[in-house]
Amino acid sequence: MKGTYNRQLVFWLACLGMLLFGIGLITLGAVLPDLRLKHSLDAVQAGTLFSILPVGIIGGSVLFGPVCDRYGYRLLLPVSALLMFAGFEGLAFTGTIWMLTLSVFLIGLGGGAINGATNAVVADISTNGKGADLSILGVFFGIGALGMPLLLSLLEETVRFEAIVAATGGLVLVAAVLFTAVRFPAAKQAEGISLKQITCMLRDGTLLMIAFFLFFQSAFEGLINNWTTTYLTERVAAPREAALMGLSAYVAGMTVMRLLIGSVFRKLPERQLLYISFAITFAALLLFRLSSSVTPAAAGLFMLGAGLAAGFPTMLGLVGNRYPDLSGTAFSFVLVIGLTGNILVNYSMGIVAENYGIRHLTTYTFTALVILTILATVIFSRLKHNK
């Protein structure tokens, strides 16, 4: 099977897909002020759009795994890119609320499938160092997530947001063509996935532990993405522009650390890497919590991004090693549980922030760090015992 495709070409196309997912995930928030003006959206309608995006991502995360394992990547990736293309063009040109909502859902659906499939295919083509290769893949998510707001801010005076979003859709269309033209690894379960295989997977205690690790890892990352700007404006009295720069520092820290994990720290054992990451995260949370101005808070956020960078690549690498013949389905399982944690924990944070104040953001994040440390200890103990 390995001789039928170009590993490097497949890897870089996966990176392109992850870049598109990063762009898709951040675009709605970046253009929401313009959308609210264009469509006269109230706060409830704007909130509905934000809730539709993760629903689409979960839908794509559910579907990609069984499809990839059964039919391979060559069909799923271009179809998913076409869904994102339709979503971007709808976001740019639609004049109705229901079409706007559908467009956001399509971006989430296609993006969720691309996110899962690119992670799974990189795990499939990596003979060793899966976590390191997945970290390099994650760098491109960070580039996409950082690049779209930067592009919009640079061009906002000269180019309408619709043109930028439509051009981004054009890039996704080019990716769809490339996905169609390139040979990917063959389907691993061409004869179908048996109920017995699924049952054994669902009864795997170690896989369940990894899934719940990602539940809290995703929740942690979502808390920082969704609530940092509010925390900085209310607790540190930061201007909105400075608060957004703080959030960018977080994404930059994660991107830089993932690049280092994929290169300098490539040979570091997964357990050691995660515990170093937990220590960095703890120090970052202390700095963030004690900061009374924007500069130290932004430094804490940069460190926080670095500390959280290893979680997803490391755990997905373990899943890929554990289920090489069902990597897509196994990735679907753990990613859906992870995304569910993001939604549920962030919803509860909203209730707490409304009733008790945004200061409890750090209460949530310290709690999540403790839980992640405990789960990681259990996971690595189980893996050592299984060996």
Image: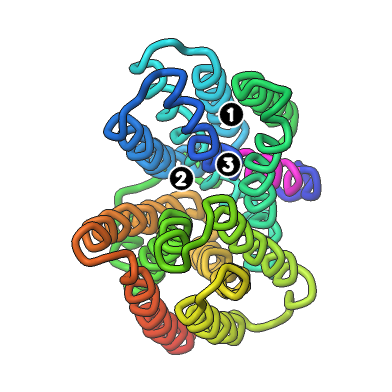
Boundaries of the magenta span: 10-21
Q: Which mark is residue 21?
A: 3
Question: Which amino acid type is marked by label 2?
Answer: Gly
Instruction: Say few, some or many: other residues with alpha carbon within 10 Å of mark 2 (under 14 / 14 to 19 / 20 or more).
Output: many
Mark number, residue 65: 2
146 left or right of 235 in image: right
Residue located 62% across and 71% down the image: 295
Q: Residue at x 48, y 32 (%)?
A: 33
- x, y (%) of residue 129? 69, 70
Image position, residue 113 (x, y; %): 49, 39
- Judge depth for marks 3 and 2 and give the one in front: 3
Compared across the picture, whether 354 is left or right of 342 comes to left
Disc 1 packing (10 Å; few <14; some 14–19; many ≥20): many
Quick one: 268 or 150, which is closer to the camera? 150
Q: Name the residue beneath numbered marker 1.
A: 81
Q: Nearer the viewer, residue 295 or 199?
A: 295
Q: CA distance from mark 2 to mark 1?
A: 16 Å
